[in-house]
Image (cartoon, rainbow, N blue to C red):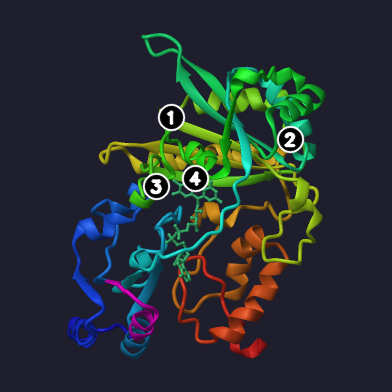
Amino acid sequence: MVPSRSSILSILVVLLLSPFIVSLPIQDSVVQSSAQNLRFTLPSVPKPEFIFTPLQESHIQAVVICSKQLGIHLRVRSGGHDFEGLSYVSEIEKPFIVVDLAKLRSISVDVKHNSAWVQTLEQGATKILYRWQEIADKLDEDLFIRVLIQTANVTSQGKRTIATSYNSLFLGDASRLLQIMQHSFPELGLTRQDCIETNWINSTVYLAGFSNNTPPEIFLQRTNLLRAYFKGKSDYAKEPIPEKALEGLWEKLFEVESPTVVFTPYGGMMSQISESQTPFPHRKGTKFMILYSTSWQDARENVAKHIDWTRMVYNYMKPYVSKNPREAYVNYRDLDLGMNNNSNTSFVEASVFGTKYFKDNFYRLVHVKTKVDPDNFFRHEQSIPPLPLHMR
Ligand SMILES: Cc1cc2nc3c(=O)[nH]c(=O)nc-3n(C[C@H](O)[C@H](O)[C@H](O)COP(=O)(O)OP(=O)(O)OC[C@H]3O[C@@H](n4cnc5c(N)ncnc54)[C@H](O)[C@@H]3O)c2cc1C
């Protein structure tokens, strides 16, 4: 049922009876407040009729019940980081409303005062990156080194080169880190000066892109330094990517202004857990995960150009990454992998993207979904579908 505008208004009236629920008429500023991908704030993108910001759990129940009774589609937003904006944009069902959990954010974390060393340095060598691919998933379990690959200007005339930054987090002391690196990855040339000694919470500030002495309280301001218009895609590598193929990738990075490729190592503890133990299946045999993304800051940019670029890079990388299925990281959601067309989700269509994100766990997730939400109330373009009626 497509609700009329009067039924939408009645939702607002019902909810206003509760003194705790803040109901906001649609203003771009509210939509934008937690939209981490500015691509979904553009005027052409559908906006919700209302955004509800509950202050306690019972308010969420009220929104869900109203939405259900009135048959108006609901989206749920927490941090708003979804790569495809699915927590606050519905392309497939309109009108829709959003319940935004921004005001329900009391979290207590018991942080042990661990020591950590973080290091970064700039290098430009494909050879070193090749070497990283061989060892990154086999390093000491307390050592994580990811590689950020971007372009950098080398002349004022705009000539560009590839810059690779090795971002690392090590849970241990600097001398032990230097020993491990000397033994496993001497090519990187790590020195004591590259290491910053800090506690764990301050290392998260560093990894979020803030300068060294920024207090962790900065997180309370919910500032995202990476907020931009962007499109991302992901892959999993089971084997090192040959140097020649990496050089071909570098050429492609010069075709857009702000490309970023991130290689994130897997292995270690992640590969000691069986594929079926949790929904997340990318375990033993996975060397690293790849993020391809392009970002821009000007709302007038041609979005299609950027989306086409990510598709071109993704096609280029096909021979070098996982197959059958070509796996993907669900946190880097990508609607190119397939989508539900409307509330009548097709189990077969959903299995295309579902098995990329979850491999065989997809089928178990379908069973869970069938049990807890058989009517498919909570849904979006890439939600897990319940089993079709004839298969239950
Ligand atoms: C700049 C940036 C950097 C990122 N970096 C990383 C990274 O380093 N590593 C990584 O793994 N991921 C990263 N991500 C991806 C991010 O972790 C995922 O998109 C994650 O799902 C975001 O959660 P959220 O609550 O912010 O998102 P939202 O957009 O609010 O929600 C994501 C999905 O969860 C649903 N949802 C939200 N709250 C609830 C709820 N309470 N109950 C049920 N469903 C809910 C939403 O409807 C939506 O489908 C990054 C994203 C951005 C934009």
**Disc 1 and disc 4 in contact, CB within 8 angstroms:** no
Residue stretch rendered in magenta on the structure: 52-62
Q: Residues within 10 Å of mark 4 (few under 14, many from 20)?
A: many
Q: Earlier in the sequence, mark 3 or mark 2?
A: 2
Report the residue marked by disc 3.
Answer: 217
Mark 3–mark 4 Cα distance, whole angstroms, equals 29 Å
Question: In terms of sequence position, does the residue under pointer 2 or pointer 1 come before the other?
Answer: 2
Residue beneath disc 4: 232
Residue identifier under label 1: 256
- Which sits earlier in the primary sequence, circle 1 or circle 4? 4
In-image side of 75 versus 187 (left or right)? left
Spatial CA distance of label 3 from label 2 is 32 Å
10 Å neighbourhood of mark 2: few (<14), some, or many (≥20)?
Answer: many
- Tell me the quarter of the picture where residue 304 sits: top left
Do the numbered discs 3 and 1 sit on residues whose CB atoms are within 8 Å? Answer: no
Numbered circle sitting on residue 233: none
- Residue 357's spot in the image, x, y percent? 63, 59
